[in-house]
Image (cartoon, rainbow, N blue to C red):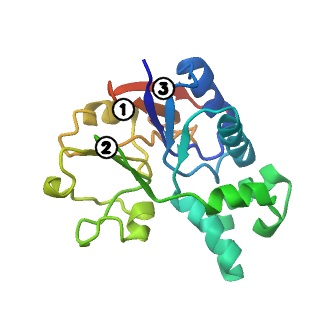
Amino acid sequence: MDRQIAISDIHGCARTFEKLLFHVLAIQPSDQLFLLGDYINKGPDSKGVIDLILRLEKEGFPCYSLRGNHEQYLIDALENPEQEMEFLGRGGIETLQSFGVNSVHDIPEEYLEFILKLGFYMELPDYLLVHAGLNFNEKDLFADEFAMLNTRAMQVDPDRIGCRKIVHGHVPTPILEIEKSLDFKNLHVSIDAGCVYKHIHALRHLVALELDTRELFVQQNID
């Protein structure tokens, strides 16, 4: 059976990401992958994470990648030199090291193109996918790009999303809490299990949510 699989907040943990995909999930070309942002920063191999996503795309895996706040930090640094220090302070040093460069402007064009084309959200029949959340005070739910990348306090109005649920990342959440929230009583769930925080016992996992069955697949950080 074809699966729809959501993963978020990989943060440079390329080995963990690869093991989750090919060993835990045993993904097939018929599976759809929805990646909810924060591929880069903090972890050791941001380049390797993007390499793996690009490889999946080239091999014909249906792979839909959204933008996270850490990709936005990089974009901001590209557009405004004054923002580069903020990027570096948010884990960007590790990102540049993974590329073997000293500035965001030296990152190879293929990777910058991947980051610059990332969208902010995706609508599915049963789910809304976004990195952080939505601003329900806006007339247009998808107008507030800052909220889609950064919000941590989302009050969901069910009348505005129909029968759909919101799946997002951005908020590091222990596995047990993620599992409890899969009943969607609050109409949303964070699937950021804090993979990059490998020394925090309650976090340090990368998870994948199979959207049809709501089954959670888990891989502890091995980077």
Question: Label 3 amino acid?
Answer: Val
Earlier sequence position, callout 1 versus callout 3 = 1
- Closest to the camera, between mark 1 and mark 3, is 1
Would you identify the image quadrant in which residue 151 lies? bottom left
Q: For this view, does 121 lie left or right of residue 31?
A: left
Identify the secondary structure beneath mark 1: loop
131, above or below 204, in the image: below
Would you identify the image quadrant in which residue 148 lies? bottom left
Q: Tell me what residue is drawn at x 35 percent, y 57 percent.
A: 133
Q: Which residue is mark 3?
A: 218
Rendering coords of residue 66 (x, y %) = 51, 52
- Can residue 44 be seen? no
Q: Which residue is mark 1?
A: 211
Earlier sequence position, callout 3 versus callout 2 = 2
143, above or below 21, in the image: below
What mark, if any, has residue 29 been given in the picture?
none
80, above or below 12, in the image: below
Rendering coords of residue 102 (x, y %) = 84, 64
- Can residue 199 be seen? yes
Work out whether residue 25 or residue 89 is closer to the camera in this orientation and state it: 25
Say which quadrant the N terminus sits in. Answer: top left
Q: Which residue is mark 2?
A: 127
- Closest to the camera, between mark 3 and mark 2, is 2
Earlier sequence position, callout 1 versus callout 2 = 2
Rendering coords of residue 11 (x, y %) = 60, 47
Q: CA distance from mark 1 to mark 3?
A: 14 Å
**Dot 1 and dot 2 residues touching (CB under 8 Å):** yes
Work out whether residue 89 or residue 63 is closer to the camera in this orientation and state it: 63
Question: Label 2 amino acid?
Answer: Tyr
The residue lying furthest to the left in this view is: 159
Rendering coords of residue 84 (x, y %) = 69, 73
**Dot 3 and dot 2 residues touching (CB under 8 Å):** no
